[in-house]
């Protein structure tokens, strides 16, 4: 390998910086299924019938029972999208740094609201460090786990499982979750590589030794590995907290959706198959969506949603008075935000302001 020094921000220098081990978890505010749903993937679903076996389904409804919020009064839909840092499988272990990490965490969570008419969408990011009350839940082994206060949100997944994450979100918001979607490390990286990379407008120079990411401000086309580092970088942007990187994650989500939507999926069956394969191999959904036929039907209903019209909001939070490294939902802003989603109405501007970020 040459010892020549490459200029800062060059693609070669970005590639030469290898991510360190023991990365802290998947930091991505998107679900791969959203890409299929919002990019018109349903029009070519007949190509993917053999991929059904790739999708993992979980019976959320059975685990939650009948004690749930009312469904929306309209034809709108609410999706809970999780980014999982599971180390299961060789690809995920390599991307996660290969450290001695057991289980998985839901380090990224989005409540995606599709209003009636399905021509736009609102994505609400729940910071991983938010302290919540975990309700009594049924674990994946069938045992009952008692309620507990002041639990960090991203720990609920590893402690009890995905159904309890759904129940926790429903209890804290009063919003009925219609569908559950989860994607892991390999699925995210594979999708970005399958579509040929994603171009983002980097808001400032990033020099993050922890993630190995080095970018100069301005438009940059990122491959899968670089994209994963971009949405997970913390030390290279803002105040170094989880709140700082949420803006990058939301920006990347819109860029990714726009990139897939711009591609001629119907005109390129081979590329469409590659994208679908990358998505489904690492996708977990609720039982109702756990087949390509169901996903395709749902996707067709979302064809009118334009990524350019998607609104991204961070749950309004304030720093916890006891532990300044944690945040709590800020009231009355958070209550107004969830109320708008429950009633399928526009989110008022004062419900988007987060004291923890000064917004």
Image (cartoon, helix red, strand yellow):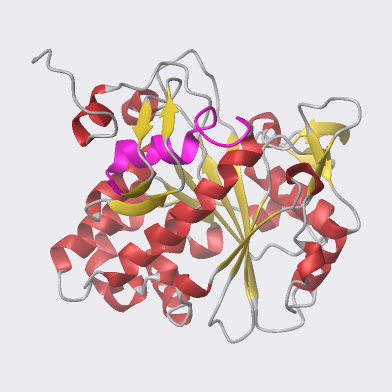
Q: Which quarter of the picture shows residue 20?
A: top left
**Horizontally, is 87 left or right of 7 in the view?**
right
Name the residue nearer the viewer: 287 or 39: 39
Name the residue nearer the viewer: 116 or 345: 345
Looking at the picture, how far across and down is residue 186, in whole percent? 35, 38
Residue 232 is inside the magenta segment:
yes
Looking at the picture, how far across and down is residue 195, in whole percent? 25, 56
Looking at the picture, how far across and down is residue 308, in whole percent? 46, 72
Name the residue nearer the viewer: 250 or 240: 240
**Horizontally, is 306 left or right of 95 in the view?**
right
Position of residue 96 relative to residue 183, above or below, is: above
Give me the residue at 77% from left, 57% from top.
353
Tell me which segment is drawn in magenta: 220-240
Position of residue 220 relative to residue 177, above or below, is: above
Quarter of the figure that contains the N terminus: top left
Whether residue 204 is visible to the viewer of this picture, yes or no, is yes
Q: Residue furthest left?
A: 2
Residue 197 is inside the magenta segment:
no
Q: Which quarter of the picture shows residue 70?
A: bottom right
Give me the residue at 51% from left, 47% from top.
248
């Amino acid at each position: 390998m040459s010892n020549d020094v490459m200029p800062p921000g060059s693609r070669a220098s970005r590639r030469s910086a290898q991510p360190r081990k023991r990365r802290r978890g998947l930091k991505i505010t998107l679900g791969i299924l959203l890409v299929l749903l919002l990019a018109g993937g349903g029009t070519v679903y007949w190509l993917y019938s053999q991929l059904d076996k790739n999708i993992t389904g979980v019976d959320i409804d059975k685990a939650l029972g009948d004690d749930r919020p009312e469904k929306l009064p309209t034809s709108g839909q609410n999706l809970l999208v999780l980014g999982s840092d599971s180390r299961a499988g060789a690809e995920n272990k390599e991307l996660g740094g290969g450290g001695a990490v057991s289980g998985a965490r839901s380090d990224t969570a989005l409540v995606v609201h599709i209003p009636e008419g399905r021509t736009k969408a609102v994505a609400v990011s729940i910071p991983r460090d938010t302290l919540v009350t975990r309700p009594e839940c049924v674990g994946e082994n069938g045992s009952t786990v008692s309620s507990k206060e002041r639990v960090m949100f991203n720990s609920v997944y590893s402690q009890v499982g995905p159904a309890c994450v759904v129940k926790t979100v429903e209890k804290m918001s009063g919003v009925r979750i219609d569908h559950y979607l989860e994607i892991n490390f390999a699925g995210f990286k594979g999708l970005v590589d399958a579509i040929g990379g994603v171009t983002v407008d980097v808001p400032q120079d990033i020099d993050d030794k922890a993630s190995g990411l080095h970018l100069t401000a301005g438009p940059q086309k990122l491959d899968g590995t670089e994209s994963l580092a971009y949405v997970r970088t913390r030390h290279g942007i803002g105040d170094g907290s989880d709140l700082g990187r949420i803006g990058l994650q939301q920006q990347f989500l819109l860029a990714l959706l726009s990139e897939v939507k711009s591609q001629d999926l119907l005109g390129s069956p081979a590329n469409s198959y590659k994208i679908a394969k990358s998505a489904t191999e690492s996708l977990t959904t609720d039982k109702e969506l756990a087949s390509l036929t169901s996903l395709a039907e749902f996707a067709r209903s979302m064809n009118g949603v334009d990524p350019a019209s998607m609104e991204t909001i961070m749950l309004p939070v304030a720093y916890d008075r006891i532990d300044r490294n944690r945040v709590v939902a800020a009231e009355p802003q958070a209550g107004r935000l969830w109320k708008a989603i429950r009633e399928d109405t526009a989110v008022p501007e004062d419900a988007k302001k987060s004291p923890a970020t000064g917004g």
